[in-house]
Image (tube, helix red, strand yellow):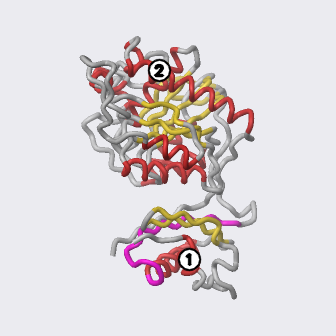
Amino acid sequence: MRITKDQVLKALGTITLPGGGVDLVSAGAVTNVLVFGTEVVLEVQIENPTLQYKKKVEVECLKAIHEHVYEKADVKVNITVNAPEQKAERIRGNKIPGVKNIVAIASGKGGVGKSTVTANLAVALAEQGYKVGLVDADIYGPSIPIMFDVEKAKPTGREVDGKKKILPVQSYGVKLLSIGFFANMDQAVVWRGAMASKALNQMLWDADWGDLDFMLIDLPPGTGDIHLSLVQSIPVTAAVVVSTPQNIALADARKGVAMFQMESIGVPVLGIVENMSYFTPAELPDNKYYIFGEGGAQQLAQQLNLPVLAEIPLVQSVREAADVGRPAVLQGATPAAIAFAKMAENVVEELNKRNVNLAATKKVEITTMSGCSSNN
């Protein structure tokens, strides 16, 4: 079963807004429709900010698509409120003082090596002379403390302009903050979305980051509360999406790109990093074996008009380096180290193009992001 955009719009045309006289589509309330196989992502704009009204619209959208298109469709409804300025809830969205560029590192799917890529990008940038900070926003699975060999570190605090600020941990020339510093590594972090978002905001705003050329944000897999909280809290300069060559990972990477490119979010995507691109045995350094498929990221990048920022090989030394807390980019002239260093150069190049050709990212003012999926 493959759903089309036209089918979705036709189904939404059967819905009349509560209190209105025209259907949802004719009223211009449907601002965007994204379809990925049997998954549908809707952007709907309304004027009534009440929770009851939002829920009514969301339920009607789900019902219409399940009844008129496909009963097992996975549907997510993102609702924005076009209310007067003074009535809309605003979440802090100013720049972090001293931070020039904020780059979100994301992946649609877990297990693709996003944190490994983030850690090596941070160290590579620091090795190239930039001032770098890294926020481990993967609240439920923080791994950055292990990758930087600081899992037992505890951030200290100091007063800045009369306010108590968290002092980030430093390793390999990178300033670090992670929820892993505030919870035992063997302790499960069981938080609702609001608590996780609050923790992210504290690491962003209640820390003394000083002057940074780059702040990298290692996001959790998928698209959810943390992602929305980030783009609401700060104007993210750009994003990088990580994937493996597998079709299932690439499909999720496409969704990750689509999330940042939504009209209501508008964060430029610098490009795609293909991790585990090919396997090169240590004894056969010139050989490449495409275990997870060949050319997947290149094809996706061409379809999305984005560059491939790097093709990172699948080699044992990268895993070993992460486990011992010394990022692989520090290994010298190995294939992985060279690939990570080149990735950093490409990120800087694309970011410079973005800053020259595009206006600064605006804060996102979505007041709610409702998501429902059904597998009836």
288 within the magenta span: no
Q: Residues within 10 Å of mark 2 (few under 14, many from 20)?
A: many
Residue 124 picture location, percent across and down:
49, 20
- Camera sees residue 323: no
- Disc sitting over residue 123 in the figure: 2
Front one among 36 and 291: 291
Front one among 365 and 167: 365
72 within the magenta span: yes
> Of the residues tagged 2 and 1, which is closer to the observer?
2
Name the residue located 62 percent from the left edge and 32 percent from the top edge: 350
Residue 55 picture location, percent across and down:
52, 74
Rendered-image quadrant of the C terminus: bottom left
Q: Residues within 10 Å of mark 1 (few under 14, many from 20)?
A: many
Q: Residue furthest front?
A: 287
**Which residue is labeled 1 in the image?**
57
The magenta-colored residue range is 67-82
